[in-house]
Image (cartoon, rainbow, N blue to C red):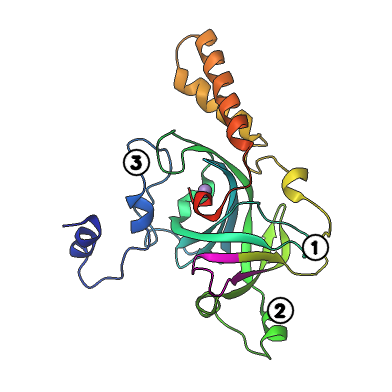
Amino acid sequence: MSKSELDEAASPGMEPDPLADYRRKRDFTRTAEPLGSDEPAAAPRAARRLFVVHKHDASHLHYDLRLELHGVLKSWAVPKGPSLDPAERRLAVAVEDHPLAYADFEGTIPEGEYGGGTVLLWDRGWWEPDEVWMKQSRGGQVLSPDEALAKGDLKFVLHGQKLKGSWALVQMKGRGAKNWLLVKHRDEWARPGSDIAEEAPLSVASGRTLEQIAAEAGAQAAGGGAAEAGTAAGGAAEAGAAAGGSAGADAAEAQR
Ligand code: MN
């Protein structure tokens, strides 16, 4: 009997667990990522839907856009990261739903584990469907987020620290269901020619760089002597810098 069959057997007649994929890919005895076991039932209903962007220095550096919907974080891996330039159409590869608790996660995932590497909380805030933009482009029709995602055309407003204003996630027809494009709409928050990833690289949670997060995790893992900890931290920072060099990730690698 497979794990997914066991999951179904454990909850007969219930909705399939949206986090089954997320949990199947991870060994929670090794990674500090949240299990999300009590969600979504135990999570208080927030009036505003969360959004976060993680900067993830895994096998290839990429960004992960996460939008709260129905008690989980719908997630897309964006190899080049979001751009405030409406002329930049950024590939966004749909990946597994993540638990809401992941919105607070920053740290390292052990090498050899799924997504192994350093995770930085690059932006956070809340999002809402962009009804104004939807009406303009769909002849007055306003779709729910579920309908919009099913049609492969979500227009939404981000209220983050780095990302603001109206955006579109558009599914690429005939290019595999997982491939979407993330595009900034032209509005007062658009900044043609800018590179927000370059201009604002730090964590919105801790003010740290990727290298600092990696180094501090290395120092903790080393425990004992201060000299030992220093060496381990240096090694982790170097590993992070080396991994960060190959940013031109392809879609398959971007998912890790
Ligand atoms: Mn990732």
Q: What element carries label 1?
A: loop
Which residue corresponds to mark 3? 28
Relative side of 14 to 112, left or right: left
Determine which of the numbered discs, if any, sits on residue 100 in the image: none
Residue 107 located left or right of residue 88: left
Rounded to the nearest whole Å, what is the CA distance between mark 2 and mark 3? 41 Å
User: Toward which corner of the image does residue 26 lie, by quadrant?
Assistant: top left
From the top left corner, tell me how far across and down residue 187 is, in percent: 80, 69
Q: What residue did someone put label 2 on?
A: 133
Q: Give the range drawn in magenta.
A: 168-180
* Three-letter amino acid code of the residue under disc 1: Trp
Q: In this view, does 208 lie above or below 233?
A: below
Residue designated by label 1: 189
- Based on the picture, tell me whether residue 134 belongs to the magenta stretch: no
Residue 173 among those drawn in magenta? yes
Left or right placement of residue 130 versus residue 231 in this view = right
Q: Where is residue 112 in the image (x, y as percent from the top left)?
A: 40, 35
